[in-house]
Amino acid sequence: MGTVWLAEDLQLGRRVALKFLSEDMAQHQAALDRFKLEARTASSLNHPNICTIYEIGEADGEYFIAMEYIEGEPLDRYMGRHKLELDELLDLAIQIADALDAAHSKGVLHRDVKPGNMLVTPRGQVKILDFGLAKLIAAGRAAEQPTYAGATMVTSSEHLTSPGMAVGTTAFMSPEQARGKELDARSDLFSFGAVLYEMATGKLPFDGETAAVIFDGILNRDPVPPIQINPQLPAKLDEIIRTALEKDRDLRYQSAADLRAELKRLKRATSSGRVPVTATGSTAATAKAVARGRSKTIYAVAAGALALAIAAGIYFLRPAHEHLFDLQHMQITQVTTTGNAGASALSPDRRYIVYVLRDGALESLWVQQLATGSNIQILPPEQVHFVALNFTPDGNYVMFVRSDKASINFRYLYRIPALGGTAQQLLRDIDSAPSFSPDGTQIAYVRGVLDSRANLILVANADGSGERVLAERKSFSPGAATVSWSGDGKNLAVVSPETRNNTSEWVVETISVKTGEVRDVYPFRTGAQAAAWLPDGHGILVVATDAQTGRGQIWFVSYPDGKVSRFTNDLTDYDACCLHVTRDGDALVALQIRVSSDIWVAGGDGSEARQITSGDILGAQLSWVGNRITTINGRAQWVLLNADGTNQTPLTNDHYPHISLSVCHDGKHVVYTTWREGKFEIWRADGDGSNATRIPSGYVVGTVNCSPDSKSADYTSDPGVFRVPLEGGTPEKLDVPFGTARYSSDGKMVLYGSQKVENGQMRSKMIVAPAGGGAPLYSFDTPYGVTNALFTPDDKGIAYLLTRNRATNIWEQKLSGGDPFPLTKFTSGDMFAFAWSPDGKQLAFSRGQRNTDVVMMSQFHGEQ
């Protein structure tokens, strides 16, 4: 078909793969049309596990596709030199299923799913490529019969399609594909089943000396059960693979989402140690008796059923009520596939979902009918931020909390008809979705009060009138505050960040609606938010950080005894912003996050940018230590690397999560915070990470900066900013506003943010003042959405991250005035952090994508 070259994009300074159609093929119109179709098809897909297409072009009569350059190797070659352990197998399989689900939801079939079309990166990410045989499902035509070899980028020719054969690669074809029948998404799932078979056993399910023998196996013979080839496989994985390889497509998985859910459940069970990983003895025998249907699994040996169920951890008992969470049969469905979803809520009857779509700095509001998948926009894109959503109990209206157009931190409560109409403002200054009382006559919500550093829990009538304060919590988290009303109407549930004995806790609390009495239920030692009471009142679901993985997971806290259990235990990172449970208590929606990030280096003015890392998630924070870059990786550890990306080494040898780091101006020391035993600690080390020493301090919120004179560490506490000598001593409070203050390189100026309500509107300012105190020197309106503001190396400007026109770039505001302007000029993608080298001649920054989608979990409600 052609050749693929490694190239450099001279405008954007990135490596790309250029795929050229061969000269012979370019003379065939059918081949040229398919080449163009590949570009159009793949470019319509935006997913972290699908190779990104940048453009299709023609140069000197040669056609090419410019696509993402992926450092990795094909899955078949990877398996040939590297035995897949179960944990890694499931990780890769879940990614593949997620990518196929994203493609199918866009109406795209791959039709050539095989290991040779999947690349595995050094950090274990799968990238599906080569949509050269892809076809839109909606086209509804039978599979074409090409007269040339159909697949490109193949490492061996053993199982290629021969001229005149059905579209696809022989060994991985579905029966309907081999017959040249009309295809749908289930054909890709059969091919994926064949890939899974090879991943699990090291062998092909259908093999032979000739294509005829392979076709005969695909059409007429069942493959050897995987568990007979590899007895170490879990029986459930054997069942999943054989279900995917059903010759009757009505008996296969009906969607990639269903297959992904099965793999995730197996991953959760095996990673928690709750199911036997080895299918030996009676377990292997039982596996053969397992029915192949997706929805129910019946074990032949009745006496062992209860023991197996307990070992699998597919349910747990609620206190005094023998009520089961049936997590084994829980359905997980990805509702959105755009990668830019925000807050969401389910209607009480589960027919609709309302969700936010983010487009750079713009956000819009959408409603989807779940049965049909049809979407309508009920509010157009605006430069605002939607904080939280809910339906009214009758499902007729959507309640939403949205920011002021001048600042993301000043919010209003609105009500709008569920299928569109005029939005009505009900309340000002509200920081959570309203939670309705069981009879629908009242709402409860949270208001963060900056001056008193407190969250107020308020109750009002459903139309916003009659507001009253029910309780005041001495904590301040307006960005992620939630409140949930119990099914019996007697209590509210909230999560309050608190400090007890210099230890941070996120306490699940209940508040009596009648008296305002507060009762502790369970303290989390890691960040927890988004409390959602189950309607029957026996427990509360909470999104909290898993201390081992750093990912947000959903937990169940029983009530009133306060016992905690895992509700999810998977690879997904659930956003603490969003968790909504339906009225029947058997469905919820949450927001899942997937992040990719690499480090780039440019000249000090942002020019000549080049990517220096690929694979590991790097760059959530960045600094320079001399001529080396230090950054935090996906495991919350600081690492050092050269400016060309080489020689990556750990900065410190401890294994605790690291939160923030600052390099002292003299380059001799770094100060950083770690999370140990439920609290933040400040540490000092030499520039190379050696001689790490803890600096005693008071309560620390989590951020730390080396002082301008390189002799002290400034840290954020509550309430205020404190300074402690690097050698230890008594902390002193600084006269700067609460939050992170940035100093100029000469230490003479300090940069901080200011917000005030003027004439009913929030006004945000960036303030530059003398470091020693005094009246502001400069003041600028803060553009909507600014993050990571700091001084430029020459101290003549303020640089910050800002997203405009669907791309995040580094912008600069000159202290001398004028309009802000972009230093970098990327046209797509997210940016997470940036830092200049000590001499200001190099600029390091991290770029990638933060994909967020709404998922729905249902059918987890067991039987009484």
Image (cartoon, rainbow, N blue to C red):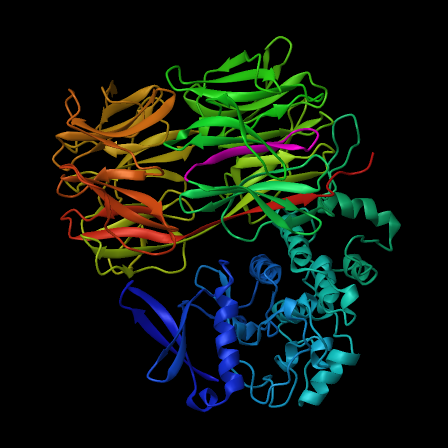
Residue 646 seen in render: no
Q: Is residue 769 above or below residue 79?
A: above
**Highlighted range, magenta:** 383-398
Residue at the extreme front of the image, as rendered: 422
> How far across and down, in percent of the image, does residue 119 sit?
49, 68
Give the x, y percent position of residue 95: 56, 59
Tell me the quarter of the image containing the C terminus: top right
Residue at 25% over, 59% down: 609
Give the tally of numbered discs: 0
Quarter of the image where one finds residue 437: top right
Task: Give percent across and percent down for residue 593.
Answer: 51, 47
**Left or right of 353, for residue 216:** right
Q: Quadrant of residue 318?
A: top right
The structure residue drawn at horizontal position 68% and vertical position 86%, both measured from the top left corner, is 208
- 684 or 218: nearer the viewer: 218
Q: Say if 225 sits above or below 561 in the image.
A: below
Residue 250 or residue 571, whichever sits in front? 250
For residue 769, above or below residue 272: above
Residue 15, horizontal then vertical, whole percent: 33, 67
Q: Is residue 700 left or right of residue 508?
A: left
Residue 193 in view, yes or no = yes
**Would residue 319 be counted in the magenta stretch?**
no
- In which quarter of the view is residue 19 placed? bottom left
Q: Is residue 613 left or right of residue 237?
A: left
Q: What residue do we see at 77% from left, 56% from top?
A: 294
